[in-house]
Image (tube, rainbow, N blue to C red):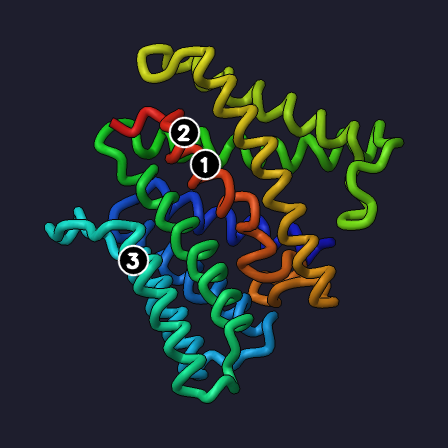
Amino acid sequence: MKQRIVTGVIGGAIFILLTILGGWFFYGLLLLLALIGFWEFIRMNGLQWHHPASLIGYAGVLFLLVPWGELGLREPSALHMIWLLMFLLLAATVMTKNKFTIDGAALLLLGALYVGYGFNAMFEVRNGDMHGLLTTLMAFGAIWASDSGAYFTGRAFGKHKLWPSISPNKTIEGSLGGVLLAVIVTAIFAFAVPDVIDLGRALLIGLVAAIAGQLGDLIQSAYKRVRGIKDTGALLPGHGGVLDRCDSWLIVFPLLVMTDLLPLG
């Protein structure tokens, strides 16, 4: 527990500092997390990082993470990027004479989208023309509030299992406590900066962040259970790997971007 707390405090402080600095500092952090996260993903699926198909997957992650606008470049169509990645992965099945199969191609396409676009959405929010730092902190605040609320409410009042076949320790009471605390946190933001975000939108952000964040956690739990592993990695002592820590982020941020709930400017 002591190691977990020390790692959490140090890691959290570095993360918050780079988030506040924004720009290329935050981008560099996200790029590092994405590369490590995708390495964890391919390792979970029995591939080595230098396998040709893995390298194609890495290229897909990097392509999805390129800050086109910051570099003064025209951003390619998302559909075109996804199709090109699919084509290259399917071509790899031919070039390897099916030693790398279509099942592997599908997994790497899924992993590249999951990791690449998830971290891209975080940069898009932080790099918004207006209030990028505020909206990023609000989104993370809602996610962390949901995690904390679910944990402590579940320990205090949890009696009914939420999804025991996937995550045996999670409870319905804990889940509801997480949603409530996330909504309270985003409501505080609305009262603090009413000229930036109104209460109704703030409550929706809290609701989406809590529900999607908890589902993101369950998604990763389900995948780890299929693969028979406890953690995706050991980067953060006491906390597991990047995908263990970022599972909620990778679902919440894309949804907040796609639903246009955050005032990105």
Q: Is residue 253 left or right of residue 221?
A: left
The image shows residue 185 at horizontal and vertical percentages of: 54, 22
Asked if disc 3 and disc 1 are in contact, CB closer than 8 Å, the reply is no
What residue sits 26% from the left and 57% below the top?
66
What residue sits 72% from the left and 63% below the top?
226
Residue 81 got which mark?
A: 3
- Residue kind at label 2, given as amino acid type: Thr
Q: Decide: few, some or many residues near mark 2? Use Cα within 10 Å; few <14, some 14-19, many ≥20.
A: few
Q: Quadrant of residue 259?
A: top left
Asked if disc 2 and disc 1 are in contact, CB closer than 8 Å, the reply is yes
Quadrant including the C terminus: top left
Q: Which residue is mark 1?
A: 255
CA–CA distance between discs 3 and 1? 19 Å
- Residue kind at label 3, given as amino acid type: Met
The image shows residue 76 at horizontal and vertical percentages of: 21, 52
Residue 259 got which mark?
A: 2
Q: Quadrant of residue 195?
A: top left
CA–CA distance between discs 2 and 1? 6 Å
CA–CA distance between discs 3 and 2? 21 Å
